[in-house]
């Protein structure tokens, strides 16, 4: 499978790859939300319909949202919609700008094989979840530690930012 140099993803995951519960993020670490904002501002962000519908007001400001969904989404304004991965990847291949996959679990799973770079916040804690980041082969990725931190505000958990580049 071909990877795309302009296709990255960003996620905050727990020790067991936990992402979300009941359609919402389980990790709300202020510094990580700031990191997410900095990494996605001005970029195309790709998400599933459910993730789009749970975004808080203003969360898409300064970004170019793309929804990947098998459902017809004519009701949404100011977003681009793609009904399948092939159409989306064709658009990515013809666009020189950077794209960032932001979730949910199904979209991560569908697009992970094509991603060149992953920005993962690994939270050193377990949490009850019903949505998980897909498993991947660590040996296929070069890992670069960006920062280790201890949250200053609740939840005061240890976490680290890593960047993984496909070999």
Image (spheres, rainbow, N blue to C red):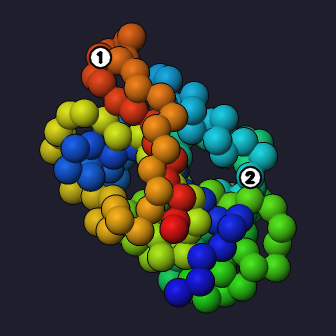
Q: Looking at the picture, does residue 8 appear above or below residue 110?
A: above
Q: How many marks?
A: 2
Using the image as rendered, state which of residue 80 and residue 39 is in the foreground.
39
Label 2, label 1: how many angstroms apart (C-alpha)? 30 Å
x and y percentages locating residue 96 in the rendered image? 83, 67
Could you tell me if the residues under marks 2 and 1 are in contact, i.e. CB atoms within 8 Å?
Answer: no
The quarter of the displayed image where residue 106 is located? bottom left
x and y percentages locating residue 7 in the rendered image? 64, 65
x and y percentages locating residue 12 in the rendered image? 40, 43
| Viewer can see residue 75 | no
Q: Looking at the picture, does residue 5 appear above or below residue 148?
A: below
Determine the secondary structure under disc 2: loop
Q: Please give the name of the residue rendered at 45% of the width and 50% of the height, measured from the top-left corner.
A: 143
- Dot 1, crowdedness within 10 Å: few (<14), some or many (≥20)? few
Q: Looking at the picture, does residue 165 appear above or below residue 63?
A: below
- In the image, is 28 to the left or to the right of 31? left
Tag shown at residue 156: 1
The quarter of the displayed image where residue 39 is located? top right
Tag shown at residue 21: none
Tag shown at residue 43: 2
Q: Please give the name of the residue rendered at 66% of the width and 80% of the height, measured from the top-left corner.
A: 88
Using the image as rendered, state which of residue 59 and residue 151 is in the foreground.
151
First in sequence: mark 2 or mark 1? 2
Q: Looking at the picture, does residue 85 appear above or below residue 23?
A: below
Determine the secondary structure under disc 1: loop
- In the image, is 98 to the left or to the right of 166? right
The quarter of the displayed image where residue 117 is located? bottom right
């Amino acid at each position: 499978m071909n990877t795309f140099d302009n296709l990255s993803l960003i996620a905050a995951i727990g020790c067991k790859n936990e992402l979300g519960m009941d359609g919402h993020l389980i990790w709300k670490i202020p510094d990580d939300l700031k990191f997410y904002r900095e990494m996605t501002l001005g970029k195309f962000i790709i998400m599933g319909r459910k993730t789009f519908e749970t975004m808080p007001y203003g969360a898409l400001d300064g970004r170019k949202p793309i929804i990947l969904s098998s459902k017809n989404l004519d009701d949404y304004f100011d977003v681009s919609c793609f009904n399948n991965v092939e159409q989306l990847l064709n658009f990515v291949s013809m666009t020189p700008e950077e794209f960032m996959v932001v979730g949910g679990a199904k979209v991560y799973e569908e697009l992970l094989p094509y991603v060149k770079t992953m920005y993962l916040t690994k939270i050193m804690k377990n949490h009850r979840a019903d949505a998980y980041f897909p498993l991947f082969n660590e040996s296929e990725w070069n890992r670069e530690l960006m920062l280790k931190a201890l949250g200053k505000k609740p939840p005061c958990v240890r976490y680290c930012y890593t960047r993984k580049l496909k070999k």
